[in-house]
Amino acid sequence: MRQAGIRTKCVTVLSVSPFEDDHASLQAIVGHSKWMMFKADHLFGAKGFLRQHDISVVLCERDLTPGTWIDVLDHLHDLPHPPSLIVTSRLADERLWAEALNLGAWNVLAKPFDRTEVIHTVKSAWQHWHDQIQMSNMATKTLRSAS
């Protein structure tokens, strides 16, 4: 069962990676804030978590076992309020960046993580997610008032 309501004022981050170092690094970066961070070690754990919780930003390792970030992105499209996806990789080159953006990811972050870059990228991804929800709510209100 999904959590009741969408928390549009709170940044909720899901870290999807088979590497515990990724989760620990991200927790060290966001631990000072009011952001809520959750973790999944694999694709199936991420899917299950996303079905039950409203998440605004997903940081996903490029390669999962099994699967990849693309499998996570495909799953996000089925959610009522799809979170913004940020792909992470030690090999974050121009090719990955172009592929990720063309397929619908919000951004790509290189590892090891840079604190300033992570905070900026997650904030902008959250703002995009938040704006999409606000636009959807406004459209719904407009349709209701027109009926």
Image (cartoon, rainbow, N blue to C red):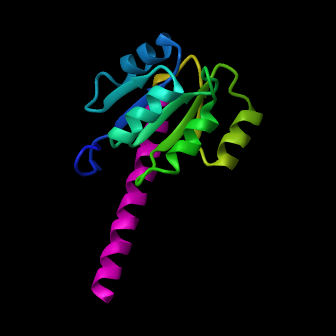
Could you tell me which quadrant the C terminus lies in? Answer: bottom left
Across the whole image, how many numbered discs are drawn on residues?
A: 0
Residue extending farthest to the left is 4
- State the residue at coordinates (28%, 85%): 145
As drawn, the residue found furthest toward the right would be 95
Please tell me whether residue 142 belongs to the stretch shown in magenta. yes
Q: Nearer the viewer, residue 111 or 52?
A: 52
Residue at the far top in the pictured view: 21
Query: How far from the left and from the top, in percent, is residue 9?
Result: 27, 47
Task: Identify the residue shown where x is 41% and y is 53%.
Answer: 81
Is 16 above or below relative to 8? Answer: above
Residue 58 appears in the picture as rendered? yes
Q: Position of residue 18 (x, y in %)?
A: 53, 16
Residue 106: quadrant of the picture: top right
Magenta residues, dominant SS class: helix
The quarter of the picture where the N terminus appears is top left
Relative horizontal placement of residue 98, taking residue 73 as reference (left or right): right
Vertical placement of residue 18 versus 74, above or below: above
The residue closer to the viewer here, 84 or 5, is 5
* 123, 45: nearer the viewer: 45
Q: Position of residue 129 (x, y in %)?
A: 43, 51
Q: Which residues are magenta?
A: 118-147
| Residue 129 colored in magenta in the image | yes
- The image position of residue 71, as x and y in percent, is 60, 37
Q: Looking at the image, which residue is at 28% across and 29% down?
A: 33
